[in-house]
């Protein structure tokens, strides 16, 4: 027997229609490239989204067609998200940190028909030239009088494209499983793979992630996503914020600029900010130098890479800001777990609480997790057993775009994350390593994440990475690679002595190398493959 409730599809257009009625005066503030701050509201954004939807329809954009963006987080990018998905087309966000060849590959693989581009990336597109033959229209995110001249097909400005169109649109209703947006994973091996989100998965993810023990967003918040809209939809914030009526503060191209982020946080009354650890490193360094504070900021959500406990501690003890450590993947829309404290943690000794806060957190409702051993058997949730983390749920991908066979799905449909994790009896998951980054010394696992977290707890260390290097006796031993804090002094022996008593002695790295900077991927993770390549022939003193 079927229930007797309305069969109304979960569509992205319903979010902005809701915001326009219920949160029309709530602001969207964008830091623009020229230093200006652009201010608009959900009400005004709605009207421009309707205009853009008309413009796209007039250009003949059909449902299912891929429309790409190459842009920073700002109000125009927000409008494109809603107009493109709203008419039933697919919003394909391009990662602007990719190499030209990778971009061309992705644009062609997705068969993008049209690209919306930030003015600063027009030369990059021009450089791609004949390599992207399918692109028929290029729209630059600017006013008509700012339109650069370039030899690109049907080049026009965003403002001239939408001008004059009706500010109301009759949003179509269609199957909620229709594709809404597309994002390619920045895989370190093989070609990038496309994750194709649906309206249903996007709306359900936004519902789940906005809950109090998720990211926790409400109309009392002002949220700053320092996570890019060009990668996994900025963790879903552009959908969650208008859904709940939170003020949306967009950093534009100032994503890694501590000074600009501090000013935005303070001036705009930001209460929640989200980003990868490297972003917060830049902010904390700026605060240290300038002596400035974080205004009304209550919490940060840190994910994308392991958040060192030292960072959680600094935010809390120096700035009164609570960190929610989270974990997710492009394939998961992306939020999978969030670390919010259980009420009984309040009674604990501080060290025990800190140990628990460093975990990647409990699953969101909608994300089912399990860990499995080498034999594929499920392992217990005892906080000790470590195995491959697998997930399933309505906002986890079922396969990849235009790829016959997924290398990451089991026959029973569970998605293999490629992460090695433990899960405790309360459901708190902790990532131990990427399967590819695991270091095996004499057949035993050494957690590179644990060692990196410890290293950055040293006051002279800004960033650290641990990789396995070949060893004649143990097959592999850990090598620690360190970036020092600006102006700090630190010797190899001091660094190694810092690990004494904090980890098993056989975990302590065999050597330390100091470098000016670590290589990062296009999404801000330390690029271990590049480091392994660089130190492939490194001879450890113990070898
Ligand atoms: P991406 O699909 O680019 O978002 O990358 C997903 C991968 O980032 C995950 O499979 C993890 O290896 C890593 N990751 C994300 N969040 C965390 C975290 N909090 N701690 C450790 N690794 C993380």
Image (spheres, helix red, strand yellow):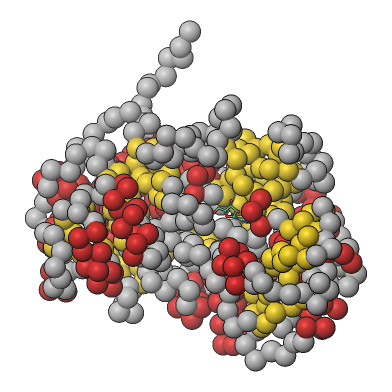
Report the front residue among 314 and 113.
113
- List x then y, in percent, for residue 379: 77, 36
- List x then y, in percent, for residue 291: 60, 86
| Quadrant position of the C terminus in the picture | bottom right
Residue plotted at (25% across, 69% down) = 127
Residue plotted at (83% across, 69% down) = 508
The quadrant holding residue 410 is top right
Residue plotted at (49% across, 42% down) = 205
Query: Which residue, as the protein is rendered here, is positioned at the far top?
Result: 1
Q: How many marks?
A: 0
In the image, residue 535 sits, relative to residue 367, either above or below, namely below
Left or right for 129, reference 483: left
The quadrant holding residue 86 is top left
Left or right for 59, reference 306: left
Left or right for 438, reference 248: right
- The answer to whether any part of residue 212 appears in the image is no
- The answer to whether any part of residue 368 appears in the image is yes
Report the front residue among 114 and 382.
114
Left or right for 272, reference 433: left
In the image, residue 76 sits, relative to residue 395, either above or below, namely below
- List x then y, in percent, for residue 238: 40, 53
- List x then y, in percent, for residue 495: 79, 80
User: Ligand 1, what quadrant?
Assistant: bottom right
Residue plotted at (55% across, 35% down) = 409
In the image, residue 97 sits, relative to residue 218, either above or below, namely below
Report the front residue among 16 and 159.
159
């Amino acid at each position: 027997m079927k229930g007797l409730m309305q069969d109304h599809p979960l569509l992205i257009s319903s979010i902005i229609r809701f915001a326009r009625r219920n949160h029309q005066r709530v602001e969207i503030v964008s830091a623009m490239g020229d230093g200006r701050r652009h201010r608009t509201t959900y009400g005004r954004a709605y009207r421009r989204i309707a205009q853009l939807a008309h413009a796209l329809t007039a250009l003949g954009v059909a449902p299912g067609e891929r429309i790409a963006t190459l842009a920073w987080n700002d109000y125009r990018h927000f409008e494109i998200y809603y107009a493109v998905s709203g008419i039933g087309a697919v919003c394909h966000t391009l990662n602007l940190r990719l190499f030209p060849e990778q971009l061309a590959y992705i644009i062609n693989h997705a068969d993008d028909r049209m690209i919306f581009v930030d003015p600063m990336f027009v030369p990059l597109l021009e450089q791609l030239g004949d390599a992207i033959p399918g692109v028929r229209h290029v729209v630059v995110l600017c006013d008509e009088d700012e339109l650069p001249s370039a030899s690109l097909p049907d080049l026009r400005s965003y403002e001239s494209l939408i001008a004059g169109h009706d500010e109301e649109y009759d949003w179509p209703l269609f199957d909620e499983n229709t594709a809404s947006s597309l994002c390619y994973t920045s895989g370190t091996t093989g070609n990038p793979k496309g994750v194709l989100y649906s309206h249903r998965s996007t709306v359900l993810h936004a519902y789940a992630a906005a809950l109090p023990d998720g990211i926790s967003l409400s109309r009392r918040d002002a949220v700053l996503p320092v996570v890019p809209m060009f990668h996994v939809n900025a963790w879903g914030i552009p959908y969650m914020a208008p859904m709940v009526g939170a003020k949306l503060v967009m950093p534009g191209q100032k994503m890694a600029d501590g000074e600009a982020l501090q000013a935005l946080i303070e001036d705009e009354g930001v209460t929640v900010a989200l980003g990868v650890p490297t972003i917060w490193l830049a902010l904390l360094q700026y605060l240290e130098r300038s002596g400035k504070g974080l205004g009304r900021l209550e919490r940060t959500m840190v994910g994308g890479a392991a958040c060192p406990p030292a960072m959680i501690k600094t935010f809390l003890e120096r700035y009164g800001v609570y960190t929610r450590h989270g974990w997710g993947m492009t394939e998961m829309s992306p939020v999978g777990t969030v670390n919010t404290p259980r009420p009984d943690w309040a009674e604990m000794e501080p060290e025990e609480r800190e140990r628990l806060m460093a975990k990647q957190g409990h699953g969101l409702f909608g994300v089912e997790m399990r860990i499995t051993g080498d034999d594929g058997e499920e392992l217990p949730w005892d906080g000790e057993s470590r195995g491959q983390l697998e997930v399933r749920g309505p906002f986890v991908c079922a396969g990849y775009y235009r790829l016959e066979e997924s290398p990451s799905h089991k026959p029973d449909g569970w998605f293999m994350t490629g992460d090695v994790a433990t899960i405790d009896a309360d459901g708190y998951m902790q990532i131990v390593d990427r399967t590819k980054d695991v270091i095996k010394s004499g057949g035993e696992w050494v957690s590179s994440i644990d060692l990196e977290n410890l290293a950055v707890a040293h006051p002279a260390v800004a960033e650290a990475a641990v990789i396995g290097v070949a060893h004649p006796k143990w097959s592999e031993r850990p090598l620690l690679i360190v970036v020092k804090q600006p102006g700090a002094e630190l010797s190899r022996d001091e660094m190694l002595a810092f690990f004494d008593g904090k980890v098993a002695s056989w975990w302590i790295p065999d050597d330390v190398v100091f470098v000016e900077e670590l290589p990062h991927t296009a999404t801000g993770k330390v690029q271990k493959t590049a480091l392994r390549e660089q130190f492939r022939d490194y001879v450890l003193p113990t070898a």
